[in-house]
Amino acid sequence: MYKLEGDKKVPARTLKKGELYRIYAFKPGKLSVGGGYYVDRDVKIKYETPSKTKLAQANCSVNK
């Protein structure tokens, strides 16, 4: 995980296997995880979208 200072990547910390983060934005070759932090989008990162069932459950709880 890193922050950007201009075009320079400034390391913030190393993520551990299994850590989960929400993705807030997609940039060319990187994913924004919020707070100005990014991770490179490569084979080490697994990006998943929620299943339709989970999306429906979230939508249901929001509409209550």
Image (tube, rainbow, N blue to C red):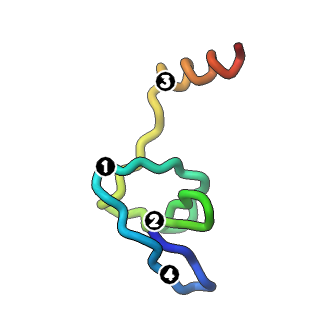
Q: What is the quadrant of the C terminus in the image?
A: top right
Q: Nearer the viewer, residue 63 or 25?
A: 63
Q: Amino acid at mark 2?
A: Val
Label 3 crowd bin: few (<14), some (14–19), many (20+), radius 10 Å = few
Label 2 crowd bin: few (<14), some (14–19), many (20+), radius 10 Å = some
Q: Residue at 71% x, 17% y: name it.
A: 63
Instruction: Note whether 64 is above or below 12 in the view shown.
Output: above
In terms of sequence position, does the residue under pointer 2 or pointer 1 come before the other? 1
Q: Which residue is mark 2?
A: 39
Q: Which residue is mark 1?
A: 18
Q: Which residue is mark 3?
A: 54
Image depth: mark 1 or mark 3 in front: 1
Q: Residue at 63% x, 21% y: name it.
A: 59
In terms of sequence position, does the residue under pointer 2 or pointer 3 come before the other? 2
Q: Amino acid at mark 3?
A: Lys
Q: Amino acid at mark 1?
A: Gly
Image depth: mark 1 or mark 4 in front: 1
Instruction: Note whether 24 is above or below 3 in the view shown.
Output: above
Q: Which residue is mark 4?
A: 9
Q: Residue at 57% x, 78% y: name it.
A: 4
Real-space Cα separation, disc 1 to disc 4, in angstroms: 23 Å
Marking on residue 4: none
In terms of sequence position, does the residue under pointer 3 or pointer 4 come before the other? 4
